[in-house]
Amino acid sequence: MAIKIISPPITEPITLDEAKQHLRIDGNDDDILIMSLIKQAREWCEAYQNRKYATQTLELVLDCFPKIGYIEFTSCSPVQSVESIKYYDVEGQEYIFDSSNYLIDTDSFISRIVLKHNCYFPSIPLQKVNGVRIRFIAGYENIPEMIKYAMIIQMKLLYDDYRPDEKTKLEETRNVLLSMNRVIPI
């Protein structure tokens, strides 16, 4: 299983002005650095939680369809929508799995594609690797405040120097905030 970024986020969950306010920065000298810190903080927190924050287009690549009647997005929830499910036979011929065969569960903690009643994933032999490609839009429509605050703490850790005990307290606070909605793959 792999996740490919098709279209990265256009906007970040934290604006440049918000970041500068929390970092107590006046002026524009460090704007490029701060924009980089915002992105780094988002990516670090997303990786820690196994979630996606900012709206982006991704592709989940699987070798085959699962034996069970659903596909979970364990490292890229929440999913807003699914654009397409494509699969490739042993000759490399592309097929599209019709959206009338499945539902998109966007309400569960881990988003998933669930087969409708009396529907099944295709059973044709697929190419050995990367036989299934699911293109989808992921990210929060309204990011929770505790995640934004965890990102701010991560930005502060990247930007400022702290004594070891202060740094440890900030890291613990960030981790507690992110642990509340963390997806831990099994």
Image (cartoon, rainbow, N blue to C red):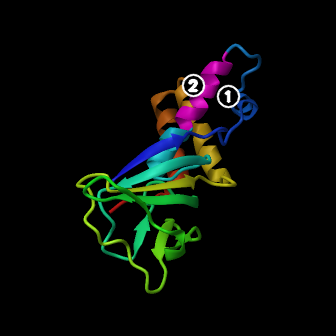
The residue lying furthest to the top in this view is 29
Determine which residue is flagged by label 1: 23
Asked if residue 18 shows in the view, the reply is yes
Nearer to me, 33 or 170: 33
Nearer to me, 107 or 154: 107
Percent x, y of residue 161: 53, 23
- For the residue labelled by badge 2, is the local secondary structure a helix, a strand or a loop? helix
Q: Main secondary structure of the magenta part?
A: helix
Q: Which mark is residue 159?
A: 2
Percent x, y of residue 142: 69, 54
The quarter holding residue 63 reads bottom left
Seen at 74% across and 16% down, the residue is 28
Quarter of the picture holding the C terminus = bottom left
Percent x, y of residue 76: 48, 54
**Tags 1 and 2 in contact by the CB under 8 Å rule?**
yes
State yes or no: residue 13 in magenta.
no
Q: Which residues are magenta?
A: 30-41
Asked if residue 169 shows in the view, the reply is no
Seen at 27% across and 61% down, the residue is 126
146 on left or right of 43? right
- For the residue labelled by badge 1, is the local secondary structure a helix, a strand or a loop? helix
Q: Is residue 41 above or below residue 50?
A: above
Percent x, y of residue 8: 56, 39
State yes or no: residue 31 in magenta.
yes
Nearer to me, 14 or 90: 90
Q: Amino acid at mark 1?
A: Leu
Nearer to me, 185 or 134: 134
Seen at 53% across and 31% down, the residue is 157
Q: Amino acid at mark 2?
A: Tyr
